[in-house]
Amino acid sequence: MHAVVLVGGFGTRLRPLTLSTPKPLLPIANVRQLEHLIAHLATAGVTHVALALGFKPEPFFQAFPDGVCAGVQLHYAVEPEPLDTAGAIAFAARDAGINDTFVVMNGDIICDLDVASLVQFHREHKAEGTLHLTPVEDPSQYGVVETNSEGWVQRFVEKPAPGETTSSVINAGTYVLEPSVLSRMPANQKLSIERVVFPQMVADGTLAAMATSDYWIDTGRPDTYLQANLDLIDGSRSTILSSVAPHCTIDSSASIAHSVIGEGSTVGAQCVITDSVLLPGAHVGNRVRLERCLVMGVVGDDASLTDCVIGAEGHVQPGHTLSGEKIPSPELAS
Ligand code: GTP
């Protein structure tokens, strides 16, 4: 089976990390997010993945030089310009010659969905498209999906006010589509699948949806990206991965709790690091305190950071105390 994985977004919410590395190539517990995702698709029988590329395609070619990821054959579909989600899916599916039922996944989702069961649900319903839905605690921040008792989508409600809907499930970013959906997406046209194509399918009664309550996280924000990392090292998931990558240098007097230490990073003497992720190549000086931080760059001696995101070009001066800062500032860098 073929899948299209959307990986061409700008990843603005995760800047400054995404200024140097596209979001799907950022590691989650020391494994690239895209590798987690494609390995997961492979368990459902996906053999070919078309990567819908736009922003910064070159790092993807470098990451998978033989065009294989987790044993799955990759096809690189590079858009001439950002085409939004439907435009990107259509471009990649046509470019890869997809002409049978296929799976689509947003490149920033980590989940335990049984994708094969979503495909089966789709086939049983003879749907044109089927969405995966996931429950959220506070639906007012999301686009909520209403279905009928047979599993057909009735309505999308964007950021519902209290009492506006009884549904609390949202579009979870994995779809099964028939190739006929492509006829709803003109070639090389910027188009949103969520805002334009799916509502058309609802009007035609051809869009089904299946809700599951298994693990699901959208890693697109700093807090959720951090959470996805920590969930993979602390037993919150069925898989537990090592929190410390090979080839990093950690001073024996450093205290590290509930944190991921990436490939090639260094941690100096008497550091105290809690609930944080050091990305590959991060350099943390002596006596540094980090709490809930994401660090790709350099943190000088005696600095103390809480809820900070330090990009590859970021450099925190020795002795500075920072809270909630992004360095370099995404506004200045963009
Ligand atoms: P933000 O800028 O932080 O919102 O992140 P994003 O650019 O990834 O946008 P969003 O999370 O809404 O995108 C959902 C998925 O679609 C992600 O996997 C993106 O990589 C992808 N995506 C969004 N826009 C495009 C596009 O124009 N082309 C391609 N190929 N993918 C896109």
Image: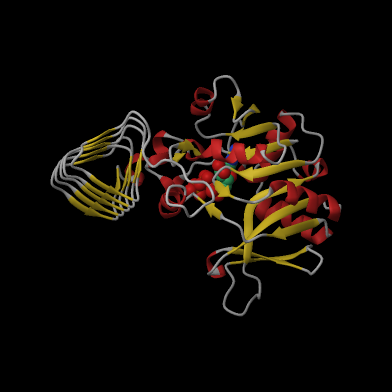
Residue depicted at x 71% and y 31%: 47
Residue depicted at x 50% and y 31%: 56
Judged from the image, the quadrant occupied by ligand 1 is: top right
The count of marks equals 0
Can see residue 89?
Answer: yes
Can see residue 221?
Answer: no
Farthest-out residue, top: 66
Quarter of the picture containing the N terminus is top right
Residue depicted at x 41% and y 54%: 223
Point out residue 261 in the picture as x, y percentages from the top left corner: 34, 40
Residue depicted at x 72% and y 37%: 45
Point out residue 160 in the picture as x, y percentages from the top left corner: 59, 71
Above or below 103: residue 322 = below
Q: Quadrant of residue 254?
A: top left
Tell me if 259 is positioned left or right of 132 in this view: left
Tell me if 193 is positioned left or right of 276 in this view: right
Point out residue 265 in the picture as x, y percentages from the top left corner: 30, 33
In this view, the residue in front, 80 or 41, is 41
Q: Quadrant of residue 82?
A: top right
Point out residue 183 in the picture as x, y percentages from the top left corner: 81, 42
Tell me if 309 is positioned left or right of 252 in this view: right
Above or below 262: residue 319 = below
Colouring method of the image: secondary structure
Quarter of the picture containing the C terminus is top left
